Image (spheres, helix red, strand yellow):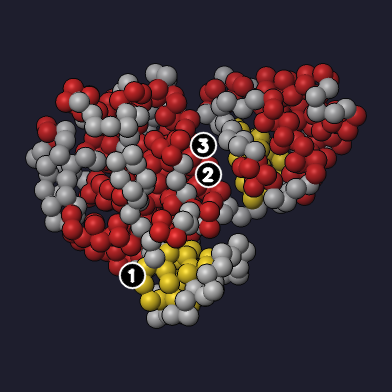
Amino acid sequence: MITPQQIKQIPATLAAVLQGMRLYPGEHPQVRRQLEAVLDAMRPLLQQKGQLQLGFADGTLLVEDLPCLEQHPSILELSQKVRDCRLKGIRFFPGLDAAQLLELMTQLNKGNSDIAEALDILGIDHIRVIPEEDTPREVYREALSVVESLYEDARLGRRPASSIAFNSVQKMVSSAISRPYALLAMTMLKDYDNYTFTHSVNVSVISLTIGRACNLPNDQLNLLGMGGMMHDLGKMTIDHAIITKPGQLSATERLEMMRHPEHGVEIVSKMNAIPPEVINIIHHHHLRFDRTGYPKDSRGCDISPLVDMVTIADTFDAMTTLRCYQKPFSPKKALDQLHQLSGSHLHPEYVEKFTSFLGPYPVGTLVRLKDGTIALVVDQNHQGENSLKLKPIITTEGQLQQNAPELNHPDGSQILAEVDPLLKGIQVEKYL
């Protein structure tokens, strides 16, 4: 059991690092000892809860939900440093080490208001800073950290912590309601080295977009997002060589892969308070609308409508992802493909509502305008239905633009056609 006294040690040890860094460089043994003291203080909570949050409420520093009322100058300085960086909190995840912690404290000392971007550039993935307002990018990044933690626990045979997944999904639901197209744009930022984690977050985000298109209430959106996030959890029990095999699977390997929904159900059944609808999604997400697919013993079972939404999301993300056996479809072409599968593989009503919600030029689509400019659709419906926000990439003279201002278009009337980014040598994800 973690005691309040242990929790209160955490801001005190962090404040000591700041003090030490005023006297010594980061590589000095004294600073290193102070960093290890922080890690020692954090470790029990990270192991027990899967994350640790430092934040503010009404100007009071909180560690988890415990207020730190200590008025020691060093702790007040720590609080001020966090506020100077325009943060409302910092989250730490298992795997945190002294080097990552030192970089965080260095950025806090600088008062860097772009601290999230700095940590991201440095590849620091076990610390997530929370801006005063969560952006879709931050919500997405946090979900990636959560999924990595959940899936790593499953791989090692540990029971994943459901609470961090619930918290992350609630933030995605809020973002999907307030800025659905901006959050959806994050699914275009493919990380092929961590495909399983990225795919799971993408399916969660795309599922939420489908749920919004179908006017699901918040409680159903939370279930949908959770099911999408954990739908492939069972793959962590399958031989990694099978999961990452670039070519076609053998018959034996395919049979093993087809067991991952059942393995997923076994894992989540041991977790705390996982709703039956989420288990239903994990178990049945490879059943098609005509109820072919697998597991075969699922046919004739009571299948939640949320399953059909996750199946569409799973298919859409696979289509828009580069694989060794396929080049990615653009979002627009992927929607066309969904329509071809509608009624057999995919639920026709949900496909229709999803495609209607995204419009003729979804976020992530590269287009040519009537004046010859080539631009990327980066957001939608800010200035009314069918309005588009475009980022110019290639000028009418054929010049590549790096930092051109975004343009608001009241509709798609200035668009001539879609452009294949591969033919233009454009990596769309660099501009989102």
In depth, the one of 169 and 102 nearer the eye is 102
Amino acid, disc 1: Pro
Amino acid, disc 3: Ser
Residue 86 visible at all: yes
- Residue 358 figure quarter: bottom left
Tell me the distance, in whole angstroms, between the alpha carbons under discs 3 and 1.
33 Å
The answer to whether residue 393 is above or below residue 271 is below
- Residue 201 figure quarter: top left
Q: Residue 97's x, y, as percent? A: 65, 25
Q: Which residue is mark 3?
A: 145
Residue 301 visible at all: no
**Between disc 1 and disc 2, whose residue precedes?**
2
Dot 3 and dot 2 residues touching (CB under 8 Å): yes
Q: Which residue is mark 1?
A: 360
- Residue 387 figure quarter: bottom left
Tell me the distance, in whole angstroms, between the alpha carbons under discs 3 and 2.
6 Å
At x 40%, y 22%, the residue is: 155
In depth, the one of 82 and 111 nearer the eye is 111
Q: Which mark is residue 141?
A: 2
Q: Residue 75's x, y, as percent? A: 80, 35
Dot 3 and dot 1 residues touching (CB under 8 Å): no
User: Dot 2: within a 10 Å radius of its alpha carbon, few (fewer than 14), some, or many (20 or more) residues?
Assistant: some
Q: Is residue 56 left or right of residue 236?
A: right
Q: Residue 204's x, y, as percent? A: 38, 46
Amino acid, disc 2: Arg
Dot 1 and dot 2 residues touching (CB under 8 Å): no
Tell me the distance, in whole angstroms, between the alpha carbons under discs 1 and 2.
28 Å
